[in-house]
Image (cartoon, rainbow, N blue to C red):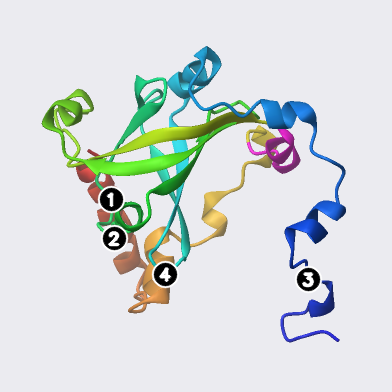
């Protein structure tokens, strides 16, 4: 019997035992590669990375993933088991930060342009406003208001399959941004309604670009 979402509920996988029965055993190397601290390979990878995604969980259990980006090597390694992420200006929803206060467990995924492999780090996060640490993270003369400090519990390199399947860095896979509306247009469509006048919409788009230039740091 198919439900309204289009899949048959009798085929839902509802236990880890059932899940694992569908796959071969985990390769020994995949188990052993998980470390509890940064080695020189993880440090080198992070030093090249200008981008990461951080996964958190809200008090009610809802999941959230947020991007973080800066010049390569923006994440500070405090020691082999601790790192710090500068919290740059955003939209002030503070989803990630609020989630960390409620539930400190986080997952990080580091990416390097041109690399098909990724670096994954799981651990416990805290929010700090330590002025010395924040001053060391200043960009263009402006220190972040807070930083996210992560106590590392697991760190491991992740294979290239997802990036190779997606062709993420393949220039032939680049898409024309003009094939979708601007961010401003889409958000206005979803909220208060976008103006019908093209010149007014262009003005709003230009204002967003100006705001990017002023509020990046």
Residue 184 at x, y percent in the picture: 37, 63
Q: Residue at x 85, y 48 (%)?
A: 23
Disc on the earlier residue, 2 or 3: 3
N-terminal of the pair, mark 4 or mark 2, is 4
| Magenta highlight range | 160-168
User: Given contact means CB atoms under 8 Å apart, are the residues at marks 4 and 2 in contact?
Assistant: no
Can you give x and y, in whole percent of width and height, for residue 33 in the image?
A: 66, 26
Alpha-carbon neighbours of circle 4 within 10 Å: few (<14), some, or many (≥20)?
A: few
Q: Nearer the viewer, mark 3 or mark 1?
A: 3
Residue 160, quarter of picture: top right
Residue depicted at x 34% and y 52%? 100
Residue at which label 4 appears: 60
Residue 192 magenta-highlighted: no
Instruction: Name the residue that disc number 1 marks.
Output: 90
The disc, 4 or 3, on the residue closer to the chain's N-terminal end is 3
For the residue labelled by badge 3, is the local secondary structure a helix, a strand or a loop?
A: loop
| Sequence-wise first label, 1 or 4 | 4
Camera-nearest residue between 168 and 3:
3
Residue tagged by mark 3? Answer: 12
Q: Is residue 137 above or below residue 172?
A: above
Estimate how packed mark 2 is, as few (under 14), some (14 to 19) or many (20 or more) residues with alpha carbons within 10 Å.
few
- Tell me how far mark 3 sits from mark 1, CA to CA: 38 Å
């Amino acid at each position: 019997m198919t439900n309204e979402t289009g899949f048959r509920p009798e085929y839902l996988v509802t236990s880890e035992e059932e899940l694992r029965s569908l796959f071969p055993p985990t390769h020994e190397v995949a188990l052993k590669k998980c470390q509890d601290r940064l080695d020189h390979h993880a440090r080198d990878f992070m030093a090249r990375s200008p981008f990461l995604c951080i996964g958190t969980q809200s008090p009610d259990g809802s999941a959230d993933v947020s991007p973080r980006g800066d010049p390569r090597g923006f994440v500070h390694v405090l020691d082999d088991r601790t790192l710090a992420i500068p919290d740059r200006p955003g939209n002030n929803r503070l989803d990630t930060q609020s989630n960390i206060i409620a539930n400190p467990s986080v997952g990080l995924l580091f990416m390097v342009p041109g690399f098909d492999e990724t670096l994954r780090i799981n651990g416990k996060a805290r929010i700090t406003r330590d002025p010395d640490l924040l001053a060391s993270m200043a960009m263009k003369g402006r220190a972040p208001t807070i930083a996210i400090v992560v106590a590392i519990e697991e760190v491991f390199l992740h294979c290239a399959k997802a990036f190779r399947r997606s062709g993420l860095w393949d220039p032939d896979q680049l898409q024309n941004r003009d094939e979708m509306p601007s961010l401003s247009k889409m958000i206005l469509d979803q909220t208060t309604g976008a103006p019908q006048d093209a010149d007014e919409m262009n003005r709003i788009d230009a204002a967003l670009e100006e705001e990017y230039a002023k509020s990046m740091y």
